[in-house]
Amino acid sequence: MPAHRSRTLDWRRCLKQVCERNGALEIAVARTSEGDEGENRHLVWRVRLVSMTEHEILVEQPTTLGQVIHLEPGIELVAILAIGQNRWMFPTTNLGLTSYQLNDHKTISVLRLVMPESVERCQRRNYYRMETAALSLPEVEIWPLLDPKSVLLAERAAQLQFEADEGLAGQDADAEAGALDDDATMPEVGPKFAATLLNIGGGGVGLRVAPQDAPALTRLKVFWLRFSLPPGLTTPICATAKLVHTHVDSTQHTYAGMAFDFSFNPMHQRLVVDQICRYIAIQQRVQLKRQADRDGLRQSA
């Protein structure tokens, strides 16, 4: 039997090994339909694998900057099991929350996910693509940040734009937001390069940087990030981030782990959290509505 086939069949043992090492799964809200590739970007969370049974996988709830991301029971998810350069994807469903006794002194709330019957190995050249499904990951614009204090105007502009887009601002704020543009409010930065947003953790992001752009990571350790999540979120998410660690994969792409940094404007953290939570809430509402529509069609048939 070919080695890759054997590894796919033995995925339960791999999953158990990850669990025993306190490792993580990656999860994302599943695409709502096959035709929305251009409009629905996936945010992928790394969540600790807590326990597993024959029929369920227990994982910690996803978080962003200390804020728990609420996932509704019944939400369909895509999960990724990664071991080294090998990745397997599978569909699953959130069965809701339960309490888990982590140790003698601590009980935590965990998500109950459906244990799949099988998994599919990701394509080697695209860690988030299978033959039958794929994750559409956001592209991130990155600038080396020359003066961290210069982000204040850009962060204020993002706040005003978000409030205007969400109908939270008054007429004066609407006018001020409309008068600001990216060029006028950009921080003091170096040349831009791009990356792919692979995952979000509790306090930062994991980015995949192409080989030709990787040298930019060595010049400075603080960066200005910006990425868009249309159509659910019309205001781009932007924030300062510090490079924490890097490693180079087998394709010579660099994985860069970055931690958000709100040292010069702690209030901006709330905006980033609100934007991410809103986007995930919208994804879930769309998915649940389509589930209800499908159920209604089946009942009327």
Image (cartoon, rainbow, N blue to C red):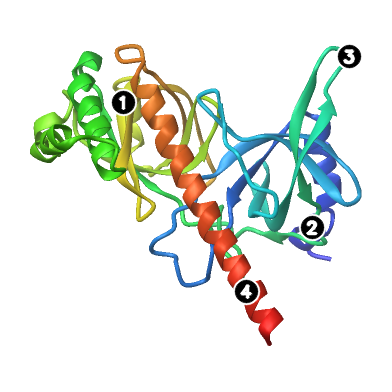
> Where does label 3 land, which residue?
104
Query: Relative to 217, does residue 149 appear above or below in the rendering?
Result: above
Label 1 to label 4, Cα distance in Å? Answer: 44 Å
Kindly check if marks 1 and 4 are in contact, taking CB atoms under 8 A apart as contact. Answer: no
Q: Position of residue 82 (x, y in %)?
A: 67, 44
> Where does label 1 land, which residue?
223
Mark closest to the chain's N terminus, 1 or 4: 1
Mark closest to the chain's N terminus, 2 or 4: 2
> Where does label 2 land, which residue?
116
- Whether residue 90 is visible, yes or no, is yes
> Where does label 4 land, which residue?
294
Label 2 to label 4, Cα distance in Å? Answer: 22 Å
Q: For the residue marked with disc 4, what is the amino acid? A: Arg
Q: Position of residue 38 (x, y in %)?
A: 38, 64
Kindly check if marks 1 and 2 are in contact, taking CB atoms under 8 A apart as contact. Answer: no
In this view of the protein, which residue sits in the foreground, 208 or 237? Answer: 237
- The answer to whether residue 11 is left or right of residue 180 is right
- The answer to whether residue 254 is left or right of residue 295 is left
Dot in front, 1 or 2: 2
Q: For the residue marked with disc 1, what is the amino acid? A: Phe
Q: Residue furthest front?
A: 170
Dot in front, 2 or 4: 4
